[in-house]
Image (cartoon, helix red, strand yellow):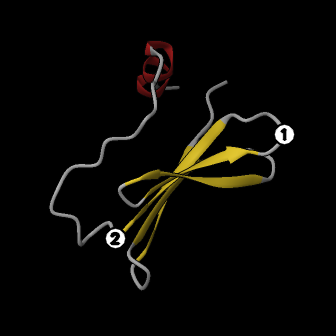
Amino acid sequence: MAQELILEYDSEGDILEASSSTHGATIAKDVGDDVWLKVEEDTGAVVGFLILNFIKRQRSVKLPLALATSDLASLTKTS
């Protein structure tokens, strides 16, 4: 079963956060350019990301993540 991706935007802090619907305790790792990965402490799995200064950006965001084709296919299926 595919996990949901939850997107939240904090307008006061200008932060976009995305994370999976289920995960354990996380730590944030700075990957540069105001982008942080949310990593599960126990497994080291990437479960989300934070983008600081999201609206103020004048450039695109490149995340160091890869999505499997099967992940994308599960998003397009309807029940």
Mark before the other along the chain sequence, 1 or 2: 1
Q: Is residue 43 left or right of residue 64?
A: right
Residue 22 x, y percent position in the rendering: 73, 44
Place of residue 9 in the rendered image (x, y in percent of width and height, measured from the top left): 43, 69
52 lies above or below 60:
below
Whole-angstrom CA distance, mark 1 to mark 2, is: 29 Å
Judged from this view, the residue extending furthest toward the bottom is 12
Whether residue 21 is visible here, answered yes or no, is no
Amino acid, disc 1: Asp
State the image coordinates of residue 35 (x, y, percent, origin top left). Answer: 43, 55
The residue lying at 44 percent from left, 81 percent from top is 13
Percent of width and height locating residue 45: 68, 34
Q: Residue at x 58, y 41 (%)?
A: 4
- Crowding at mark 2 (Cα within 10 Å: few <14, some 14-19, many 20+): some
Residue 3 located left or right of residue 70: right
Crowd rating for badge 1 (residues with CA inside 10 Å; few <14, some 14–19, many 20+):
few
Q: How many marks?
A: 2
| Disc ID at residue 53 | 2
Residue 42 image label: 1
- Residue 54 appears left or right of 66: left
Q: Secondary structure at mark 1?
A: loop
Near-viewer residue (42 or 77): 42
Name which quarter of the figure residue 16 lies in: bottom left
Name, please, the residue furthest toward the right: 42
| Relative to 26, 35 lies left or right | left
Above or below, 39 against 58 in this view is: above
Report the residue at 52% width, 51% height from top.
Answer: 49
Quadrant for the N terminus in the image: top right
Q: Amino acid at mark 2?
A: Asn
Callout 2: helix, strand or loop?
loop
Q: Residue at x 61, y 28 (%)?
A: 2
Name, please, the residue furthest toward the left: 58
